[in-house]
Image (cartoon, helix red, strand yellow):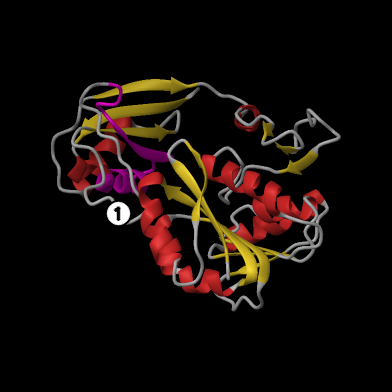
């Protein structure tokens, strides 16, 4: 028997409580989608964490994954009752065929060419260019597979700015991809920090997989020292808050690159960092910018 996806419509105020109640009632997973997606009434949700004032969609679709033998009416009824609703929603049921989920996931990630000499290669792929600098990376819990425009912007900037033996700090390292790239591009002392312990763990594993020496640590621990190159690919909100800490690690004459910034946010970030060093737009891709500058 196949697993089953059960779909029904609700509103924004009930969608999230219903998902929580469905999981308590035995659902394997529950997610919320815009029921108007693909129509003129679609409601895109943009913004950084904490910046979306009214999350959810007026017309929400809840998609619930259930075991093959689960009693759909019983699970839905228990969830509805738990949040104080009495009417059973009209729903549709779709069988979910058994698949090789690992193989399916891996098929979604192909090698990514960053430049003439720099590739990102999932570990299960052969490198398209064995003579290139290949970053061997597995998509995992930590952000950073190289597919996002901001990651590419930072990789391209590092390729232009990392010199042999220079020191590099990756502030908000995620998977460690930027620090690992810096090491493979010839940097000497390489370090990375992240607020997420899973990111630190993934970064250390990826560094070992790539045969490079890089020190990754939790950002809750003090980060010591100044660096020739500092790169921070996070989001504009933390970039605002962390400006003093990030700039403190750029040595006089050292270079800083920031990304995770939308084009319309660039002017504000430049103004904030101006008290430590001048920044300018180094590159743009798909409305994302990379800001860079040298500390006096």
Q: In the rendered view, does 241 fall on the left or right side of 230?
A: left
**Which corner quadrant of the image does residue 88 belong to?**
top left
Residue 104 percent across, percent down from the top left? 61, 27
Q: Is residue 236 magenta?
A: no
**Which corner quadrant of the image does residue 114 belong to?**
top right
Instruction: Look at the image and tell me whether residue 44 can be seen.
Output: yes
Residue 245 vertical placement versus 95 (above, below): below
Which residue is located at x 27 percent, y 36 percent? Answer: 76
Instruction: Look at the image and tell me whether residue 238 can be seen.
Output: no
**Which corner quadrant of the image does residue 108 belong to?**
top right
Which residue is located at x 32 percent, y 31 percent? Answer: 72
Secondary structure of the residue carrying tag 1 is loop
Residue 188 percent across, percent down from the top left? 80, 63
Q: Give 17 or 201, whichever is nearer the viewer.
A: 201
Residue 287 percent across, percent down from the top left? 43, 39
**Residue under circle 1?**
51
Q: Give the number of marks.
A: 1
Q: Which residues are magenta?
A: 16-38
Q: Give 27 or 192, whichever is nearer the viewer.
A: 192
Which residue is located at x 70 percent, y 35 percent? Answer: 115
Residue 130 percent across, percent down from the top left? 85, 33
């Amino acid at each position: 028997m196949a697993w089953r996806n059960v779909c029904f419509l609700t509103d924004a105020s009930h969608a999230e409580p219903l998902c929580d109640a469905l999981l308590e009632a035995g659902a394997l997973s529950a997610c919320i989608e815009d029921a108007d997606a693909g129509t003129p009434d679609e409601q895109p949700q943009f913004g950084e964490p904490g910046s979306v004032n009214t999350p959810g969609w007026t017309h929400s679709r809840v998609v619930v994954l259930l075991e093959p033998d689960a009693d759909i009416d019983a699970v839905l009824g228990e969830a509805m009752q738990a949040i104080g609703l009495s009417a059973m929603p009209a729903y549709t049921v779709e069988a979910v065929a058994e698949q090789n989920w690992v193989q399916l996931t891996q098929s979604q990630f192909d090698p990514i060419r960053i430049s003439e000499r720099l590739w990102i290669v999932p570990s299960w792929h052969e490198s398209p260019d064995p003579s290139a600098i290949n970053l061997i990376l597995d998509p995992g819990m930590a952000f950073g597979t190289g597919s996002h425009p901001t990651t590419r912007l930072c990789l391209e900037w590092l390729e232009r700015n990392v010199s042999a033996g220079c020191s590099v700090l990756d502030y908000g390292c995620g998977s460690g991809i930027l620090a690992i790239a810096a090491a493979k591009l010839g940097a000497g002392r390489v370090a990375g920090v992240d607020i997420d312990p899973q990111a630190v763990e993934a970064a250390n594993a990826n560094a070992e997989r790539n045969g490079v020496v890089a020190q990754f640590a939790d950002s809750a621990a003090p980060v010591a020292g100044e660096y020739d190159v500092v790169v921070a690919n996070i989001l504009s909100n933390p970039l605002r808050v962390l400006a003093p800490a990030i700039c403190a690690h750029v040595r006089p004459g050292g270079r800083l690159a920031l990304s995770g910034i939308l084009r319309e946010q660039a002017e504000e970030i430049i103004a904030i960092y101006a008290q430590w060093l001048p920044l300018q737009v180094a590159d743009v891709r798909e409305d994302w910018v990379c800001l860079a500058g040298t500390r006096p």
